Image: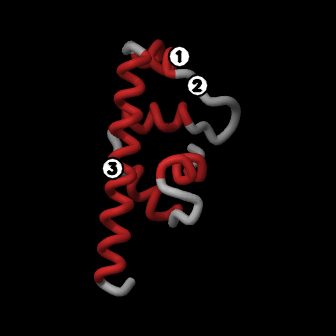
């Protein structure tokens, strides 16, 4: 999986990649599949339609899963950064 792409797209260029990997660990298998196909390590991004075909859902449902996944990663990252600031880490 291309962690850097997700970090750039959802959190910012200065993201702590280890923390992003940890946040990705909170995703369900289905959410992780969607993120991996939208941000591949090698090759082209897969469209929502084709991800949906593979999962047996619509492209719109894939978009919803992706948005939920991105929100989980962003919130987990923000919470950890807040914790680190408050505790001097």
Residue nearest the observer in this picture, 39 or 13: 13
Give the labeled residue for mark 1. Answer: 50
Mark 2 and mark 1 residues within 8 Å of each other at the beta carbon: yes
| Residue receiving disc 3 | 26
Picture residue at 61% right of the left edge, 37% below the top:
40
The 10 Å Cα crowd at callout 2, few under 14, some 14 to 19, many 20 or more, is some
The C terminus lies in quadrant = bottom left
Q: Earlier in the sequence, mark 3 or mark 1?
A: 3
Residue beneath the point at 52% across and 37% down:
36
Q: Seen in the image, is 74 located left or right of residue 39?
A: left
Q: Which mark is residue 11?
A: none
Q: Secondary structure at mark 1?
A: helix
Query: Percent from the top left, x then y, of residue 73?
Result: 38, 51
* Residue of label 2: 46
Q: Which of pointers 2 and 3 indicates the residue nearer the eye?
A: 2
- Whether residue 89 sits left or right of residue 43 in the image: it is left
* Rendered position, 19 above or below 64: below
- How far, Cα to Cα, is label 2 from label 3? 22 Å
| Mark 3, secondary structure of its residue | loop
Give the residue displayed 50% in from the left and 21% down from the top: 48
């Amino acid at each position: 999986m291309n962690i850097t792409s997700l970090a750039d797209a959802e959190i910012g260029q200065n993201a702590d990649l280890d923390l992003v990997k940890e946040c990705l660990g909170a995703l369900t298998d289905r959410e992780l599949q969607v993120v991996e196909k939208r941000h591949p390590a090698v090759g082209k991004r897969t469209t929502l339609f084709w991800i949906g075909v593979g999962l047996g859902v619509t492209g719109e449902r894939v978009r919803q899963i992706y948005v939920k996944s991105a929100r989980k990663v962003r919130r987990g990252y923000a919470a950890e950064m807040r914790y680190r600031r408050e505790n001097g880490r």
